Image: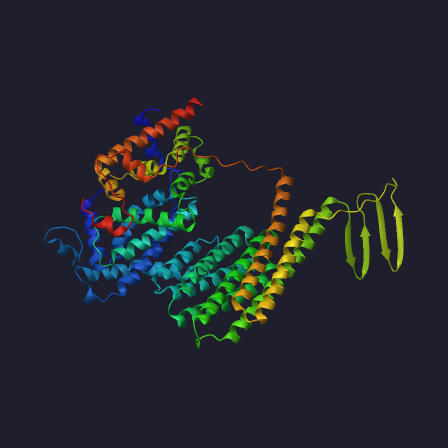
Amino acid sequence: MERNNLIKQLKSLSETKAGGHCREAWVRDTRAVLMEKATQDAESMPVGEVKQMRFAIDMGAGWQKMMRPAVAMAVIVVLLFGGSIATVSASYGSLPGDALYSIKIFSEGAQLSLVPGKENKTKMRMDFAGRRLDEVAKLVETPVVEKEKKIGEAVGRFKKNIEEVNKDLDKIKQQKNKKKAVQVAKDVDRKAEEYGEAIKKAINKVPAESKKEVKKAKAVVDEVGVKAVEVLIEKHAEGETEEVTEEEIIEKINKKIQQAEETIAEVEGDIEEAAQEAFEEGGEEVVTEEGGEEVVTEEGGEEVVTEEGGEEVVEESEEGTEVTEGEEPVEGEATEETTDQAKENIEEAKVLLDSKDLLGALGAVKEANTLASAAEEEIGGETTEEVVEETGESVEGEETVEGATTSTEEIVTEETEEPIQQSTTTEEVINTTE
Amino acid sequence: MRNKFKEKLLLYKIKAKHDPEAFGEIYDEYAEKIYRFIFFKVASEQEAEDLSSEVFLKAWNYLIGEKPVKSIGALLYTIARNRVIDYYRQKKFEIEATEEMAKQLPEDTSLAELEKKADLARVYKALGKLKDEYREIVVMRYLDDLSIAEIASIIQKTRNNVRVLLHRSVSALKDILEEEENK
């Protein structure tokens, strides 16, 4: 391809979606939110205080007269942006997949950027995570198309918010203002418990395809709760504080132990369920309990054993072949071992808590939670593999890109007519004269 | 923005009067360009939209601050570049950032619309194989239609360096295309 032709092709690529042609709806919605924010900022600045700000534009004299009709501008601004304010308000009740949902998410980002102090940001992130759970609850109750996908989006954003809070807590741990740090940690812990309970309630109502993600979200929120208690312990260890007492922390750790025990029990339930499914799929043995009666049925056309009303009936199949016992899946054993280890950790946590080793006890709870998540993941992993095998789909490896590793420095040295310094700060770039 | 006088006028309106409408005009001019610039660096349309929105919000906050601004284009692209770097840092790609960025061109789903334009599809794919620095400059120059001077102020190089880099980028792209043809 000729050089000129190639350049023409590149230019026409910009007209296509693959060439980065963006969605009109996104352009419009983002504009509405930006205008909303800009209008608020403009209104919050009293007219008398509008200063001739220092900025490096050499425009020449007299041009300022063009800017005079400020009052007219203000009227236009009000007329123009009345609509966009309504749009943002209307977006509050939107759900994933709605046209206004991106505005809702973006306006939250804008609020986050405006709120001062990392403690306030953390609290706000936690509140936004709560909104995502409300959305899940609404989606579960509402008959919508692509329900799993939409729930997946809300859950994904919930996890993202909580993970951000988790990172925030690491910074808050270093916070010298003990009072503030303790307040935030308590707030996070309280909400984490609240959200954990909400997820537990929702988990049975979400579509089967969404369950795995919802369970992961539960693990993430439990983790952040534990991290919050860790902050409380560390702040308490730094010296007596009125904000949090040892008794309070012990009570919180006990709750975390209880929570971990519940999670392990749930995982064990899932393991049993998975083992049961494995048997059923293998067509070897089905065990069901109905109304106190036990019915054991071999479904391979081999033998039927039924126990009803105290009578045992054994029927040989027509072929009269020998009965084979269903084998226990090896994967199930592995996950059971993991949950057993988790249980051991819980026992250890209890012992450590009795001896007032708060951090040690919490560490053991953390370990138990990690193991429970790993066991849950193992069960989930088996299911996914089975689905792939069944549908016969294969996943091709990603194409590797060759020669993509040259760093900026290499380019600079390649062209060394003039040494160039790379700048990463916005300020430096802006101040550089052309 | 081609009209320098208009851009400076808008800049004044924003700096001195916090004029939302002026910012709206800037947004209209640059929304697609900034989106495209980011789109070629991240994994999905969704991420490109989120990051682009943030870039404009940050730009607004910067513009209404006290610090002087010489060029709105340079400001926007610089914020976009830094935001993409932060994005990869957050994803723990610090060391392999450049390499990863190069790999993370959007998936081929949108290629369907290019089916009828086989050449374009080939150029698109070749662009994905270009190293990040080259791709960035090609996108700015030929897809976003920025001038050499604008690119120079964004990537902090002299105009001559930009010209040389651009020449090498197109040659590299050409080589990739020829290599593909000969396969």
Residue A434 or A336: which is nearer the viewer?
A336
**x, y percentage for residue B136?**
33, 39
Give the left or right position of residue A308, taking residue A289 as reference. right
Image spot of residue A148 (x, y percent): 56, 52
A239 up-or-down from A365: above or below:
below
Residue that sits furthest to the bottom in the current view: A242
Q: Residue furthest top?
A: B182
Is the C terminus of chain A in the top left, top right, bottom left or bottom right quadrant?
A: top left
How many discs appear?
Answer: 0
Front residue of A214 and A143: A214
Rendering coords of residue A154 (x, y %): 50, 56
Q: Could you tell me if residue A143 is visible in this image?
A: no
The one of A272 and B43 positioned closer to us in this rendering: A272
Q: Is residue A355 left or right of residue A48?
A: right
Q: Residue at x 80, y 43 (%)?
A: A300
Quadrant into which the N terminus of chain A falls: top left
Residue at x 24%, y 65% (from the top left corner): A45
Can residue A418 be seen in the rendering of this structure?
yes
* Image spot of residue A24 (x, y percent): 38, 47
Q: Residue furthest left?
A: A61
Q: How is the rendered protein coloured?
A: rainbow
For residue A52, which quarter of the picture? bottom left
Q: Which residue is at the front of the view, A216 or B113?
A: A216
Q: Image height check: is A303 above or below A344?
A: above
